[in-house]
Amino acid sequence: MRAAVALSLVIASTFVAPAMADDITGHPRIHDADTIFFGTQEVRLDGIDAPEPRQTCQDATGKSYPCGQSAIAALVDEIGNASIRCSGAQHDNHHRLLVTCFKDSENLNGWLVAHGWAVAFRSLSTGYVSQEDQARAAKLGMWAGTFDQPREWRKTH
């Protein structure tokens, strides 16, 4: 009997419940175009990588501009005064909840990539590759000129 109870405890302790999605709703504070705060909770937009706040890019004429600030401004303008809904179940290596955010039915992660203010984070997800390809072809946002991939820029700065 003790062996059966012990075996049951071992089985129960090794069972991992599937991750439950966390939903957050409200008006966020934008840190950068892929990291936002709801109060003190920091969340990361899943599947995308946006330029850092201090990152600069070059426009079509080769002139430097603050593309990180431009990406933030684009997201702030898109959200406006609306309340957004973000949902996710996984965490990144910085313990931030990875989320997909929506303004009404619009996927804001995809919106940023489609408008050239973020790139698909291909090493983690292929969910936004088609939006990136379209933004690149249309020369939208950062694709109008040249830029360092955000992950490469972070390595050198």
Image (cartoon, rainbow, N blue to C red):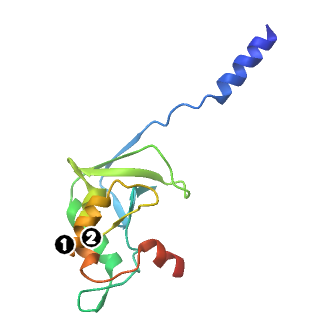
Vertical placement of residue 32 versus 102, above or below: below
Vertical placement of residue 148 versus 131, above or below: below
Mark 2 — residue? 116
- For mark 2, give the secondary structure: loop
From the viewer's perspective, tell me whether residue 87 is left or right of residue 2. Answer: left
> Counting residues from the N terminus, which is met first, the one under dot 2 or under dot 1?
2
Q: CA distance from mark 2 to mark 1?
A: 9 Å
Q: Is residue 115 visible?
A: no
Label drawn at residue 74? none
Q: Residues within 10 Å of mark 2 (few under 14, many from 20)?
A: many
Q: Is residue 57 visible?
A: yes
From the viewer's perspective, tell me whether residue 94 is left or right of residue 14. Answer: left
Q: Quadrant of residue 140?
A: bottom left
Residue type (three-letter) at the residue carrying disc 1: Ala
Vertical placement of residue 61 versus 22, above or below: below
- For mark 1, give the secondary structure: helix
Mark 1 — residue? 138
Residue type (three-letter) at the residue carrying disc 2: Gly
From the viewer's perspective, tell me whether residue 67 is left or right of residue 20. Answer: left
**Residue 103: x and y, percent?**
23, 52
